Image (cartoon, helix red, strand yellow):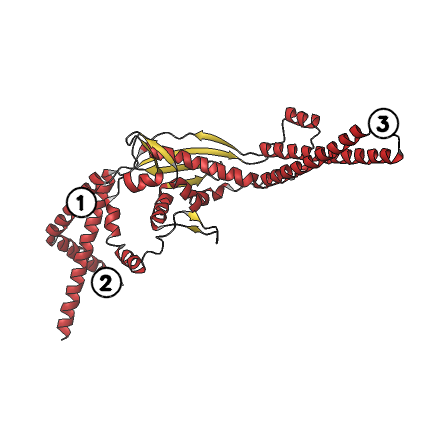
Amino acid sequence: MKNKTEESSYRKEIDLVDLINFLLTKRKIILYTVTVSIFLGIVYALIIPPQYEAQTTMLPQLGDNGGMSSGLSGLASLAGVNLGQVGNTKGDISADLYPEIVNSVPFQVEMLNTEFFLEELRDTISYREYLECFSPKDPLNKVKKYTLGLPGLVINMLKGGILDEGGGETSSKDSLFKLNRSDFILIESGKRSLNASVDKKTGKVTLSMVSTHPKVAAIMTNRALTLLQDFVIDFRLAKARQEFVFIDKLLLEKMDEYESAQQKLSSFRDRNINITTSSARAELIRLEGEYQLRLGVYTEIAKQRESSNIEIQKNIPNFTIIDPVVVPLDKVYPSKLKIIITSFFLGLLFCLIILGAIEVLSFLRSKADFYK
């Protein structure tokens, strides 16, 4: 047993010595490959456009507001408004879904359509125009496009471009959101640039945006924050607003009926100042009863409308901005040192793989010649 252990240890030492000798014999090739790799890494680090990141942190307050203040409750009581008449309009959306919202196609299309002013251009442009015409491009993306992405480009050319029609619009016939290929690529890029994260312990929501221009990063982060808040507010108040629109429409109808009954009653009184007949007195009673009925219905619906409006205002979500958007001063990417170190290891790994593959093929070939 001891002899087998010593033999195994001896073999490992021989293998290690052989490996070191192999590396020493190939040191010039390894050194050349690593040098070329480091040089390419330095060139890439110099030409790659810098990336700036802007971020903001907010704390959404979507729970029950704890009831109305005493002053507002008193005002509602004086107006004869019963807040309990309106159903519960709370429909909070979970903060865990915020990342899904910012990555949705409608959200990204709104981001692309955002317009802003740039001093360098002295003009107002959309975010889509900035990405297509003015944003510096990463040269590595073009290399990927015409190497790894070449089969996809050929297939798309043969197909004639399935997504070339449309432009970020919703068809009225089939209610489908249609994108052209350019918008599709920009949206996928936007999903990688915009990030939303939620701290489940504290409930904080952090939005961050990466761009090649520091001011654009700040503008688009602020725009994403506004769009996200609007989405949450619309989702929460959708039911209450539908109820308000219905009550408001109903109130207009009942107001017309109330005014018509009032006009009929006034006209009858003007024509019959001295009522002497029983039929005229009965008609007056009927018109007064109809007027009181229309007035009561109109007044009650007006109270419900006011209640609905107060309920909407009461349930508007609050968003506390903990960390506002600031135009970044320092770039977050690229780190030239990291790129150079990565290039060194990639070059070394690539060289070792190629040399190892050559040695294996040489061994297999010699073994095949031996058996012949």
Give residue 246's quadrant in the image. Answer: top right
Give the x, y percent position of residue 28. 10, 50
Q: What residue is shown with label 2? A: 3
Q: Residues within 10 Å of mark 3 (few under 14, many from 20)?
A: few
Circle 1 sits in a helix, a strand or a loop, which is it? Answer: helix
Q: What residue is shown with label 1? A: 40
Q: What residue is shown with label 3? A: 274
For marks 2 and 1, give the CA distance. Answer: 51 Å
For marks 3 and 2, give the CA distance. Answer: 136 Å
Q: Residues within 10 Å of mark 1 (few under 14, many from 20)?
A: some
Residue 14 visible in image: no
Give the x, y percent position of residue 244. 61, 37
User: On the rendered image, what quadrant is the N terminus found in?
Assistant: bottom left
Q: Which residue is drawn at 38% across and 48% down?
A: 167
Q: Residues within 10 Å of mark 2 (few under 14, many from 20)?
A: few
Give the x, y percent position of residue 197. 43, 40
